[in-house]
Structure formats: structure tokens, C-alpha cells
Amino acid sequence: MDRPDETVKFPSCDAYFGTIQSKKKLPLSLQESLTSAFAQIPVSSFPDVPNGRVIEIPGDTSVLDAVRILSEHNIRAAPVLNPESGAPADWKGRYLGIIDYSAIILWVLENAEIAAVALSAGSATAAGVGMGALGAVGVAALGAPGPAAVAGLTAAAVGAAVAGGLTAEKGVAKDGLTAADHLGEDFYKVLLQQEPFKSTTVRSIVESYRWSPFVPITLDTSMLTVLLLLSKYRLRNVPVIEPDKPIIKNFITQTGVVKGLQQCKGRDWFDYISALPLSDLGLPFMSLDEVITVNSGDLILEAFKCMKDNKIGGVPVIEGPNRKLVGSVSIRDIRFLLLRPDLFSNFRQLTVMEFMKTIGSTVPDSGNGLVKPPLTCSADSSLGSVIDSIASRITHRIYVVDGDFEVVGVVTLRDVISCFIYEPPGYCDNYLASAMDKLEDKGAGSVDTN
């Protein structure tokens, strides 16, 4: 498995943002006025999270318990508290980072690879041979006596493998798909019930994978900075702290911003921009050939691996040569596999379509035995109608389809936010430089983004 780059940095997003800005058919005077207005609005004016309390997860929480917390509160991410006593009193000592479904996907897939090693290894020596391919999370979970730990779960894993017709002579499996395929429902018994996976904590995941930088802003930061971080700089959420206090007071997300924009109906600037067709705003950004899809007959774990490999939060599910849209799967759906393994006893043959049907039979208001049909729009839809659709379903994307329901594009929350702002030359330079200094002081590892 490829390892993330070790350099801590914000991603270079100039190409994406520059293209969006160059295609927008908006009067320059309107863009300048809006940008200036957002630069004058402090973050303190943004609505608080529901109930006024940011959900935080202690670092010693198990991965499954963390998924339960995210699911119960209907949130996609949460700050992780440092469980160590005596840690520095500032935010860098209080928080380890953010846990979200993106990091959990990485953990599931990498531990599936460990399971593949275990089911294929016939001895501690054979398990040890495979240790080099386990990756950071696997090594952190296994600790120093890694081969012995793998050997400890070999009996259960290999027993299930032999029952399924797989023999150790086939060698060490190269990916988690092989493990899940051969273990079937026993894949979950290994992943959820066997050590070292069962005791893996949120801390080990956060410290091994950083999907995005964790650098809080203060209440006096401008909303323009927030909007740029959530659009051009590809962050999904921005924690907010009070000056000189380590507590996260607010947690601003892309979803929250788009819902806030929706509340601006009736204002001249919003009504003007929202009435424009997507094409006048440079959307959809990706061409037909660039839209990443999965087929309904693909294995569900392959769909999650596709999201992980391409660093995206969801994929459209298509059928046939004409790419007809039949559903959608998001990173967040991993919670169903982890929290309700009883629903997937046929995991060995579980396709994306079967996964959606199974979830659809248990989730209220899913309709037609599937998870809610994905949001769609046409290429000539107005930005306002897209915002209304996205805000009504609290989803991160809407698919652009033609008359035959063929997927021709996708519009994300990031794209929507980008339509309302541009970055004055050098505007974020000081903030980003300061953020990098804080990350380096904190000793952060690699940074990855979606």
C-alpha cells in the first residue's frame, strides 16, 4: 500500500480554483463586493452547532464506539481529545486531531489486509514475512511483537479460510478484498472481535492518518478565510476556538455553510447568483470522463477502496454501457458495515446493489428498497435549485445527468461555495504560514485531503 507523503502541507489547489474563477460569468464588481463583505464578517457571527455543544471523542475510545457516536449524532467528524493527563493546556495539548469516516475507511481497508495476511499465514514466521506490507495503522495496532499478534488470530482466521476452501499454500493475500471474499461473514469476526483490531483506539488512527490539517481558527477570523478553507483549500470542517482558550466552541462544515447561504434568499446578490445556470458558474468542474463511478455489480468493499484510492467522499453507482445512474454510495456508509454486520451475512458475495438494497430495507423513507435515490440535476439547472436540493438532504454532492439518466458530471459542496468567492492576491498567505508553523510545532505527520 502506498504511504502518504511525510511532508506537512496544505494541498495546492490553484488549478481547480483558478478554473472555477475563470469560468464564472459574474460581474467583477459583484465578486469584489461579496469578497469584501465576507472579509468583514467575523466567524463569531456564524450559528453554533446544534444544541450549542461540539461533540468530542476521547482518544482512548475504540473505533467502533467512535463510529457509534458519529452515527448517533448524525455527524461526519469530531475532534479527538488527548486522554493523557498532564498534557499542555493549550489546544495543541488538548486535541489530537479530527476523526472522520475517511480515516475509518483507511483503517478498515488496511486491517482487511492484515486479515488477509492472517488467513493466509500458517505460522508466526509466515505472518512475520507479511509484516512489511501492513502499513502504519497495522503496525501501530500490532505493536512491537507484531508477528506474534498476527499469529494469535491466525487460528481463527485460517480455520475460517480452510472452511471456505482457501489453503495456506496460496500465499499471502495482497489486499483486503481477498480476505473479505474468502472469510465471508467471518471477516467481521476477525475485524470486530479479534485482537489487535478490537482494541484499536481512535488515537492510533488519528496519529497515523491525517486526512486534513487540524488547525483551529479563532472567533475573530473572517468568514472569507473559512469559505476559502472549505472550498479552495479542500477542508471539510474548520474548528473554532475562543482566543486564549483551548476549547472548541464551534465546528463549521461545508454543509453548514451551504445551508447558511440558502438562508440568504431575498438578498439581491444571492438571488442574482443563484438564478444562473451551472454552466455560467463553471460547473460541473469535472468532465464526463473524469467522473469516478462504480458498477452496481462491484463488491461493496471495492467501492470503499475506490473512494480511498481517489480521495473522494462518494461515488455514483451505474449500470450498463450508458452509465445509467441507479444509486450512490458514500464514505459515511461504512458505518452500516461496522455497526450492523448481522445484516451482511452474505458478505462474501455482497455487491454494491445488494448493499444498497439491504440498507434500504432497514432505513426509514429510503424508498424502492434502496437507500434514498441520489440527488440529480440537469446541466442547465440553476445554482439555487442545486443548493435547495443539497440542503434538503444534507448530502455532499449532486449528480448531473442527461435525459437518459446517464451521469455526465457531479457538483459538490466545495463547488457551490467556490461560486460565491474568490481569493484576493496573498489573502491567505499569512494564515497558511501560521498554520504550517503550528502543525510543525505540534509534530503532525502527513496531511491528506479530499
Image (cartoon, helix red, strand yellow):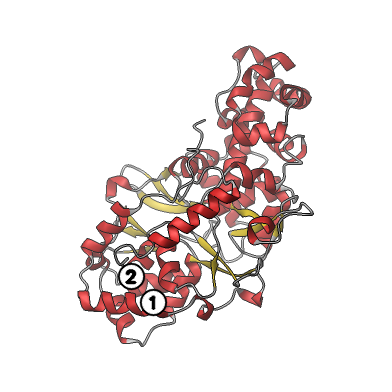
Kind of residue indicated by mark 2: Ile
Q: Quadrant of residue 169?
A: top right
Residue located 40% across and 82% down the image = 264
* Relative side of 183 to 305, left or right: right
Say what secondary structure mark 2 lies in. Answer: loop
- Name the one closer to the observer, 398 or 354: 398
Q: Nearer the viewer, residue 253 or 329?
A: 253
Residue 38 image label: 1
Q: Residues within 10 Å of mark 2 (few under 14, many from 20)?
A: many
Residue 438's spot in the image, x, y percent?
Answer: 54, 55
Q: Residue 386, located in which quarter of the rendered image?
A: bottom left
Give the image location of residue 137, x and y in percent: 63, 37
Q: Which mark is residue 421?
A: 2
Task: Find out whether the residues at labels 1 and 2 contact each other: C-beta distance under 8 Å.
Answer: yes
Residue drawn at x 29%, y 69% is 381
| Mark carried by residue 316 | none
